[in-house]
Image (cartoon, rainbow, N blue to C red):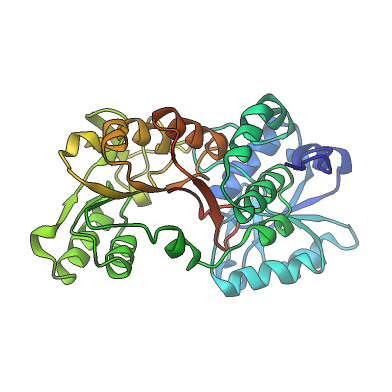
Amino acid sequence: MNTSEIKQDLWKYLAEEHRPIALYGTGDGADKIIAVLEKRGLSDLIAAVFASDGFVRDRMFHGMKVMSYSDCCKALAPADFIVLVCFGSARPEVLEKVQEIASERELYVPDVPVYGDIIFDRAFFENNQSRIENVFACLEDDASRICFENYVNYKLTGNISYLAKCESAPEEELTLLSGISGGCYVDLGAYYGDTLTRYLTEFPCIKTAVAVEPERHSFAKLTAFAEQLGRGSDIRCINALAGGKQGKELVSDSRGRGTRALANSNVALSKTREIDVVTVDSLGLEDVCFIKFDVEGSESEAVEGARETILRSRPLMKIACYHRSEDVFAIAEKVLAVRDDYKIYMRHTRCIPGWDTDLFFI
């Protein structure tokens, strides 16, 4: 794997450049990026905040007036400022706007973890280099190796040109999963039923499905979607978290996707509720053919909770590997520690930052 061209990470680069920074976005992502800049003594470089035209309004963010991009350029002229994108999106019109700004200004999309506070900087890479290279060596095809290498380089630099080199068509996963046979499909992090619908439609050989979703509003939509599929008792929906052991846990009652209030979240939460934690092994399933893991930074724990199922059924698995900085190598290590006879693939579909990146175990 070639990372030799990356001599320093984004945060070191910003410290050495010491140019003004304009933040693009005002949500949780901006909060996290500001926190990293503050921790590294770089918050004095933040000169402005701007938002897309429809989100400007008359408001303040961290004591700064939120502007449009054009007003930001006027306010900072003639300074040569750097733009940091502080949100995630896969929408074509949003990505087009980001590319437009990138053609005019030096622009980066910093990789800050969705969960946890470990930043994938040069020191983190060097401390885990052997583990990263070991996983790279286990990848099955050139597309996976190209994806992995560029994804790591993106995480170090925030340079979206590396993400562009990672991209694959969404249809590629269907080819990777073509070996799904009749059995039970387990959807961990089923959201409102989008993936449940997709996989049951694409793989009609699947006999039964279990969909686990913690967030109560999404769960209500999930159950409605399941009913619309007309599969009756073939689909079982569970309002719970997926983890490494059974129990109870607090989740946010006010943030999307059932954000874990204790174990995972690095944002302040005010309203919580208790919810069940289930494991795949505790569900009493036979003949599991496919498991999708997208569980908000608890993927490694959920793999541990599926250990006996993996040993017994050897299901195909799709596992999100972008929630935590260590996921890019730690998840593969976790699976291979259970069984070492999987072929491993990696794919990233178009999105900023490096979300929608998954490992496939075939």
Horizontal and vertical percent position of residue 113: 56, 41
Q: Observer-nearest residue: 33 or 335?
A: 335
- Residue 308 rendering spot, x and y as whole percentages: 27, 31
Q: Residue furthest front?
A: 341
x and y percent of residue 236 in the render? 15, 53
Q: Is residue 248 left or right of residue 194?
A: left
**Relative vertical location of residue 307 with respect to residue 229 in this rendering, above or below:** above
Q: Nearer the viewer, residue 231 or 76?
A: 231
Going by the image, does 256 lie left or right of 80?
left
Give the vertical position of 279 relative to 26 (above or below). above
Question: Which quarter shows the N terminus?
Answer: top right
Residue positioned most to the right? 78
**Residue lying furthest left:** 233
Q: Residue visible at 51% across and 55% down?
A: 356
Q: How many marks do you count on the picture?
A: 0
Q: Residue at x 22, y 66 (%)?
A: 225
Q: Position of residue 294 (x, y in %)?
A: 39, 48
Q: 153 or 345, which lies in front?
A: 345
Residue at image coords 33%, 69%: 202
